[in-house]
Image (cartoon, coloured by chain):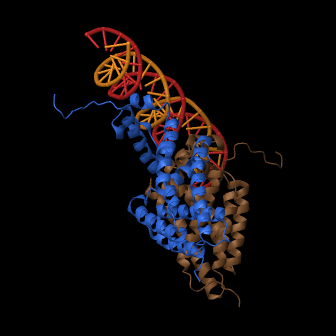
Chain colours: A brown, B blue, C orange, D red
Amino acid sequence: MSLVTEKTNVRNADVTRQKILDVAFEEVLLKGYQGLRVDGVLKKTALTKGAFYHHFSSKKELGHAVIDEVLKPWIENRWINPLKAIRHPIDDLIRMLEDARDEISAKELHTGCPLNNLTQEMSPLDESFRIRIANIWQLWHEALVETLQRGQKLGLVKSSIKPKNVARFLIASMEGIIGQCKCYMNDQAFYEAGACLQDYLESLRVEST
Amino acid sequence: MSLVTEKTNVRNADVTRQKILDVAFEEVLLKGYQGLRVDGVLKKTALTKGAFYHHFSSKKELGHAVIDEVLKPWIENRWINPLKAIRHPIDDLIRMLEDARDEISAKELHTGCPLNNLTQEMSPLDESFRIRIANIWQLWHEALVETLQRGQKLGLVKSSIKPKNVARFLIASMEGIIGQCKCYMNDQAFYEAGACLQDYLESLRVEST
DNA sequence: TTAATAACAAACCAACTAGTCTGTCAAACA
DNA sequence: TGTTTGACAGACTAGTTGGTTTGTTATTAA
C-alpha cells in the first residue's frame, strides 16, 4: 500500500452537491433558469441523474439552492459586505464603481449581473423565486442606506439627501448600466454612463469649506 | 343578400399574422422568448400549426418579427418619437418620467420593459437577436442625444455636460428603476429612485439668472 | 467483520415541443 | 365557371426534457 492514496471513485456528497450548484450557477448566468438543462449540468459535471436527484428533488429546488447558496453569498461578498467597511462613502463608492467597471469589462460583459438576470426572468414567473431574489435586493439596499447614513453622521454626505432614495437610485443605475453593456457587448456604455453616475455621487458630497 | 356581410370564416392573412405577432409579444413579455411556446400562441389565437408555419418558418423567425414589427414600433411610439417634439428637455423629460411611472404602475409593474427583458435574456444567447435589439437601443440613445443637444443650443441645458454620456445614463437609470419595480412588484422603487433621477435632471438645467 | 445506508450509475418513461405533411376550403384569376 | 393558389386545419413525428426506478458500490456504524 503506497503512502499516496490513489482514489478514483471517491465519494464526497458535499463536493458533489457543490459541483452541481457551481455549474448550475454558470448555466443560469448564461442561459437563464428556463434555459438551464438538468442534463446539461450533468454533462458538465460528469455526473448522472442518480446523483442529481439524490441531492435535489427537482430542477426548481436546484434553482432555489443556486439562489440561496451561490448567488446570495456571491452578492454579499462582491457588493454588500464591502459597503460595511466603507469610511468615506463618496470616495469609496466611486472606487467600487471603477472596480466594478474593470471586473465587468473583463468577464461579465456578456453575462450581466446574475442577480438582475434572475430578477428580470423569474419575478413574473414564479413567486418562490421572486421572494428569494427580492430578499437579496433588500439586503443590498439596507446596507447601502446604512453606508449613506454613516456618511451623513460623519459630515461627509449631504444631510439633505434621503439615503433610502439615493440607495435605490444607485443600485438601479448600476444595474441599468450593466444591462446596457450586455447588449452592446462592450464597456463603452459603462464609461459613458459611469461618468454621469460619478458626477451624481460627487453631488452628494459635502463641500469642505 | 344583406348589406351587412356576415362572415364567420373570413380569411385575412394580414390580420392573422398580426394576431400571432401580438399574442407572441405578450407571451414574450411575460415568459421571455425561451418561455414562449408556439402551441401557447396558437391556443391563445385559436389558430393551428398550419396557420403558424404558413406565416413564419420557425419560432426564431417569429422572435425576429416580434422585435422588428411589434417591439421596435412600440419603443419608437412610447419613448423615441416623443423626444423629437420636446422643446424644453429638462421639464419635458421630467414629465415623461412621471408619465412612465404612472403607466408602469398601472400595468407594466410585473412585466417590466419589453426591450430590456429581451436584452437581458437574449443578448448572450443569440447574435441575431442581440443585433436587432442593440439597434433599437441605439435609436433611442441617438434621439435622446439630439434632444439634449437641442437643449444646449437653446441655452436650457448646461453646455458642460456631454449629451452622449447623459443620454446613456438616463436610459440605464430608467431601465434599472423599472427592473427594481418588477422584483418588488410595487412602484415604491420608482418613487424612491425617481426622485433622485429627477434631481439629476434638474442638475442639468441652466439656472436662469 | 458485517449489516445498513448513503451516494451514486444508468436505463427508462411520459410529457412536451418545434416542426412536417397531407388535405381542405375560400378567394382571385382566367 | 372552372382552375389555380393562397390560407389555413389538424394529425403526426422526432427529438428533447424533467423526472423515476432499479441496481451497484463506497462508506460507516455495530
Residue A58 seen in this snapshot = no
Q: Is residue A117 above or below residue B192?
A: above
- The reply, left or right, for residue B80 in relation to residue A194 is left
Q: Residue at x 41, y 36 (%)?
A: B17
- Residue lying farthest to the bottom in this orientation: A209
> How far from the left and from the top, in percent, is residue A155?
65, 88
- Residue lying farthest to the left in this orientation: B2
Residue B152 seen in this snapshot = yes
Q: Is residue B26 above or below residue B41?
A: below
- The reply, left or right, for residue A188 in relation to residue A128 is right
> How far from the left and from the top, in percent, is residue B125?
60, 44
The N terminus of chain A: image quadrant: top right
The C terminus of chain A: image quadrant: bottom right
Q: Nearer the viewer, residue B34 or A135?
A: B34
Q: Residue at x 48, y 59 (%)?
A: B82
Looking at the rendering, which quadrant does residue A93 occupy?
bottom right
Q: Residue at x 50, y 57 (%)?
A: B79
Looking at the image, how many numbered discs can be counted on the residues? 0
Q: Is residue B51 above or below residue B199?
A: above
Q: Is residue C9 above or below residue A194?
A: above
Q: Nearer the viewer, residue B117 or D29?
A: B117
> How far from the left and from the top, in percent, is residue B163?
64, 64
Q: Nearer the viewer, residue A61 or A53?
A: A61
- The reply, left or right, for residue B65 in relation to residue A177 is left
> How far from the left and from the top, in percent, is residue B195?
51, 74
Q: Residue at x 51, y 53 (%)?
A: A121
Looking at the rendering, which quadrant does residue A195 occupy?
bottom right
